[in-house]
Each structure stands twice: as C-alpha cells, then as structure tokens.
Image (cartoon, rainbow, N blue to C red):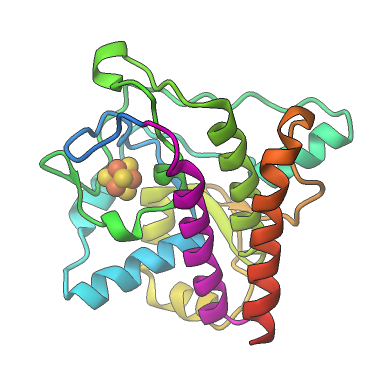
Amino acid sequence: MNIETRLRVLEKIYALHADFCGPFALACGQGCARCCTANVTLTTLEALRIIRHWHAQGRSVPLAALTAAAQSPRFQPALTINRMAALCLQGAEVPEEAADPAVGPCPLLEADRCSIYPARPLACRAMVSRDTCAQGGAADMPEEILSANHLLMQFVEALDLSGASANLADALLFLLQPDQLAAYTSGAPITAAPPLAPHHAIPALMIPPELRARLLPLAQAVQACIRNLALG
Ligand code: SF4
C-alpha cells in the first residue's frame, strides 16, 4: 500500500473513531486542554499528516516549540501497542512505561487550543472523558471507548509497518529532516532507534470478551476499508 493510500486509511480510522464515540455524552470541548501535554505520542504516518497539514495551511513549522519540547522532560515510548500485545500473548512480562502527568503542555497547543486540530493524532482523539477533567482532575473514559482506542491504535500501527511511534516532538523533528522525510515517503523502512519505537504487525486483536459484540464490527469496518482502498 503506498503512502497516499495509507493516509486515506488513516483518515477513515479517525472517522470510525469519531462515529464510535459520537453516541457517548462526553464533556470534552473547545478550550479544555488538560490532556494536551508534552507526553503525547503518535506514529510517523500521523506525523507526516501533520507536516502536510502545515504545508496545506501555509503555516510555518513551529520548530522552536518542537525543539524546546524535545529538550524537556517528556514521555518517550519504548514499546508499541502491538509489541505489548505480542509480549502478553507470549506470557512475557510487559515493562511498565510511566508518563509523568506534570510535564509541560504539548508544543502544538496555542492559547489552550490545538493548532493542528484537524490533523491531531489518534492519541489525542482517544482522550475523552464523561466529566470535565478540570473538575475531577482525571479523565473518566467509558470502558468501550478505552477498548476501541486500543483496537484502533493496533490498526494505526500496522498501517505504518515501515515506520515507528514516538513522542510527538521527537517524531515531527525526525520527519522534518528532508532526507528522512524523502526516505520515509518513498516507503523505505526508517532506521528506528530510540527515541523511535519500531512498529509491529498485529499479533492478535485486543478485544475484551465482554466487548466482542460491540468492537468486532469496528474491527471489521477497518479491515473492509483497508481492503477497499488497497484494491481501489
Ligand atoms: S496535538 Fe493538539 S490535541 Fe494533541 S496534545 Fe497537542 S495540542 Fe492537544
């Protein structure tokens, strides 16, 4: 699947996530940015989408903010969701990866608003809450959405097998290097080394048995989209 097709599948996955969350009464709204921290992560395909968004909008890249974020404390994932799923299946211990919630704001947050909102990655779309986090201090996420997030993150990773996941600032700064961007968009596997966590295929879909009836149609919708767009 070429990069343009993969970007179209990514759009579709975002739309499926929005459709899935639509019926829930959620408190999230404009101007609430408590979950917009420097810990946010994304895949290289999602980073490419953000870079293209800047170009399409004629916006300059916030290099100073990204560079400052990459020099500050932030969550840097060592394992992807599919790698964790594989370790679980093998009965191996999954290392704990803790993110400090007290790190600073996301470098793409401007006056409490996301500066790339239409191009924000799945990790941002996934952060929803039934209650206002500013009041309770933490998100109250419905179990179904939490599981749907995990499921769709597995597909987003598998869609980008030649890529990697990383902290948002690290991934964007990596792909903003012209030689890395050219190699990545040509389909060459990136040389994934820390702070980039290499991607893996889906070893098994992470669907809790009690949510099977609810989540299987979502997985099937993604699979159908991949089939249709890959053949089209
Ligand atoms: S990319 Fe946008 S939505 Fe995501 S954490 Fe940053 S400011 Fe918030």
Please, is residue 213 above or below residue 229 in the view? above
Q: Nearer the viewer, residue 229 or 48?
A: 229
Instruction: Kindly give the residue lying farthest to the right in the view shown.
Output: 90
Q: Left or right: where does residue 55 sit relative to residue 150?
A: left
Split into quadrants, the picture shows ligand 1 in the one at: top left
Q: Does the magenta stretch include residue 84?
A: no
Which is nearer the eye, 52 or 148? 148
> In the depicted view, which residue is nearer to us: 72 or 204?
204
Q: In which quarter of the image is residue 53?
A: bottom left
Residue lying farthest top? Answer: 136
- Count the numbered circles shown: 0
Please name the predominant secondary structure of the magenta segment in the image: helix
Q: Give the range drawn in magenta.
A: 1-25
Q: Is residue 167 left or right of residue 9?
A: left
Residue, far front = 23
How far across and down, in percent of the image, does residue 195 sit?
Answer: 51, 47
Which residue corresponds to the image point at 35% horizontal and 54% vertical from the top-left?
A: 120
The residue under the point 19% across, 40% down is: 30
Near-viewer residue (82 or 187): 82
Residue displayed at 69% across by 26% down: 95
Residue 23 visible in image: yes
- Where 123 sits versus 156, above or below? above
Q: Is residue 145 above or below residue 44?
A: above
